[in-house]
Amino acid sequence: MLAVLVLLLIISLVITGANVLLESRLNLAVSAKENLRNKAAAISKANQLTYLLATQRLTIAGISQGINPEGFARNEDDQFINLIVGDEIRVDGHVYEFEQKQFSYSIQSQRGLLSVNTSGQRWLKKWIQSQNQDALQTNRMLDSLFDYADGDYTQKPAGKDGKNYQNIRNYLLQSCSELFLVQHWQAFLTLHPDFLSHCSLQRSSVLNLNQVPISLWRIFWPTSIDRLIEMRDSGLWFSTLSDAYLVEPSIAGLSEQHLSTLGGQQFSVMVSYPITNSKLQNEIDLGQAKESKLKNQIVCLIHVGSGNNPPMVIKP
């Protein structure tokens, strides 16, 4: 009798274990299917945004969605009558949510960020000095960056070139993270990693004031940040630099060769989507799965030509 009870207990435990394992596998399959659906939806959104950037009109308010015919009215000279179409998606990094706020996307024009691939270093200098770096350290960083990216071994007064590197590239930076290889930049980036979110690889030092992200404007011109946020949320944008001077008077003394209110050919598109596996999502929320967190984001850099119907190239 005792042997029978033991046998029944063993069978019961085996069946229970099998049920738990089967349920776990089923949940995993459901999660995988849901994650695939979410990823497909995110890719679809990224493709849609890429198409808009490649084909639609770029205005001071952003990239048009092409759904407001009145905004595309032209005069007898075939010029657009309206500065703003009225259906634009912002290109200042503003985050939009969709699918019951489970998904989000943003577009950031590189013209609103700080270029590290140009000899014009006004905006880089301003960012560095905003972090209480003295003139000597600022010059070291800027000169070293110039020496690293130029095509020769001639060293600037405060820079580092040639013999200071084991294998210097002497070419334009291919990623913003490459700044960690530049002399005098490592410690700064370790203390201020948010600089990388304001970094651009474009070849122009012109800063488009309509495309500057809120976080960067707050660093450069903190006294006018509240007014700027209110303007953008109300759909108001700078049509001329004179409009910008009224919001932030300090930029009135800057050369117009460093500022603009329209234009841009490089855009970063980011689409975020949820991961349904509860264990993995908890790890992400706790910051314990850094590598996995990247898996629920799609990021691409789009380069477009000029004109209203430009050619499109996607850079990896």
Image (spheres, grey):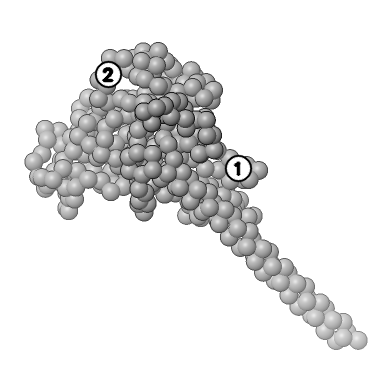
Picture residue at 48% right of the left edge, 18% below the top: 227
**Residue 248 appears in the figure:** no
Q: Is residue 4 left or right of residue 37?
A: right
Q: Residue 226 location, x and y as percent?
A: 49, 19
Residue 254, compared with residue 262, is above or below; it is above
Q: Residue 220 location, x and y as percent?
A: 37, 23
For badge 2, the amino acid type reads Leu
Q: Kindly state the secondary structure of the residue where label 1 is placed.
A: strand
Residue 28, compared with residue 257, is above or below; it is below
Picture residue at 58% right of the left edge, 46% below the top: 103
Q: Residue 269 location, x and y as percent?
A: 44, 44
**Residue 291 appears in the figure:** yes
Q: Quadrant of the C terminus?
A: bottom left
Label 2: how many residues lie within 10 Å, few (<14), some (14-19) or many (20+)? few
Residue named by callout 2? 254
Residue 124, compared with residue 286, is above or below; it is above
How far apart marks 1 and 2 lie (CA) works out to: 39 Å
Which image quarter: residue 249?
A: top left
For badge 1, the amino acid type reads Phe
Farthest residue to the right: give it. Answer: 1
Q: Residue 72 location, x and y as percent?
A: 47, 32
Q: Quadrant of the N terminus?
A: bottom right
Labels 1 & 2 near each other (Cβ < 8 A): no
Which image quarter: residue 21?
A: bottom right
Q: Tell me which numbered mark, 1 or 2, is placed earlier along the sequence.
A: 1
Q: Kindly state the secondary structure of the residue where label 2 is placed.
A: loop
Farthest residue to the front: give it. Answer: 76
Label total for image: 2
Residue 1, compared with residue 182, is above or below; it is below
Picture residue at 43% right of the left edge, 29% below the top: 74
Residue named by callout 1? 98
